[in-house]
Structures are given as C-alpha cells and as structure tokens.
C-alpha cells in the first residue's frame, strides 16, 4: 500500500465520504430523518425506495449499522421484527446533509418534483416547495 492509499485509509474525511457516497445511502438517512422518533422496518424502505433492489437496501442498512449511524433492533413477538433507527451520530449528521443540499442549491438549480426530486420537503432553500 502506497502512502496516499494509507492516508486515505486513515483519514476520517475519506472514510466518511466513501461511506456516504455509496448509492442510496443518503436517501436512507434522509427518509429516517423525516421521522426521527419512528422505527423503520425493512419493508418500509422497500416502499420508500421503489425500484431499489432488496440486496442494495440490505447492504446499505448493514453498512449504516456497522458505521454507527443507525441502530438495528430485533423484537420477537410472533415472528422476528427488525427495526432501524438513527443513532445520535446519525441524527447529528442530518444537518450536515441539509447544509450540503443548501450549498448545492445555491450553485445549481433544483429539479422539480415532477421530474423526480422528492426531497424538497427537507430543505428550506429548495425552490420546489
């Protein structure tokens, strides 16, 4: 491993951008942020993100749990129910994501909801509200 790769491996900025830059990661976090006091079940994410494969959702949720941004809870009633919640670290990340969106909106144009953006309700600066 060369020095640059070693620096990337040990740099929190690179590690966090690598995690959050993965497909669907931000969307999962933002959906959980819409109701931070609610527990989300796996099937909720399948409804929220139609067209995203079950494998992709499962992989991203596992990575969010491993990173400490999301907690995973198992409850056994008649069958096992697994729920996901933002952790304190995950809740603290949401304002950072919102700041990124607002920074982007300052230098670019929001895509209207009719063209596929459904995140406008999360941000004050979006012109598509």
Image: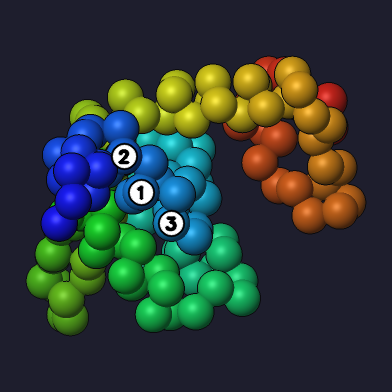
Instruction: From the top left corner, tell me how far across and down residue 2 is, in percent.
Output: 18, 51
Residue 23 falls left or right of residue 114: left
- Do callouts 1 and 2 mark residues in contact (Cβ within 8 Å)? yes
> Closer to the observer: label 3 or label 2?
2
Residue 39 is at least partly visible in this image: no
Q: Residues within 10 Å of mark 1 (few under 14, many from 20)?
A: few
State which quarter of the image contains the N terminus.
bottom left
In the foreground, 105 or 40: 105
Q: CA distance from mark 3 to mark 2?
A: 12 Å
In the foreground, 77 or 103: 103
Q: Which residue is mark 1?
A: 18
Q: Residue at x 49, y 60 (%)?
A: 23
* In the depicted structure, whether residue 62 falls above or below residue 89: below
- Label for residue 14? 2
Residue 109 falls in image quadrant: top right
Q: Residue furthest front?
A: 2
Residue 61 falls left or right of residue 113: left
Q: Residues within 10 Å of mark 2 (few under 14, many from 20)?
A: few
Residue 98 is at least partly visible in this image: yes
Instruction: From the top left corner, tell me how far across and down residue 72 is, in percent.
Output: 18, 56
Q: Residues within 10 Å of mark 3 (few under 14, many from 20)?
A: few
In the foreground, 118 or 75: 118
Q: Residue at x 45, y 64 (%)?
A: 44
Q: Secondary structure at mark 1?
A: helix
Q: Which residue is mark 3?
A: 22
Q: Secondary structure at mark 3?
A: loop
- Do callouts 1 and 3 mark residues in contact (Cβ within 8 Å)? yes
């Amino acid at each position: 491993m060369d020095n640059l790769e070693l620096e990337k491996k040990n740099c929190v900025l690179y590690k966090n951008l690598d995690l959050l830059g993965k497909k669907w990661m931000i969307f999962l976090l933002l959906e959980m942020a819409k109701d931070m006091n609610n527990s989300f079940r796996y099937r909720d994410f399948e409804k929220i993100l139609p067209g995203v494969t079950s494998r992709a959702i499962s992989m991203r949720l596992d990575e969010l749990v491993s990173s400490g941004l999301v907690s995973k809870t198992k409850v056994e009633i008649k069958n096992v129910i697994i729920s996901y919640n933002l952790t304190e670290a995950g809740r603290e990340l949401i304002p950072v994501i919102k700041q990124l969106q607002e920074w982007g909106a300052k230098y670019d144009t929001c895509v209207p909801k009719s063209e596929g953006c459904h995140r406008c309700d999360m941000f004050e600066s979006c012109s598509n509200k």
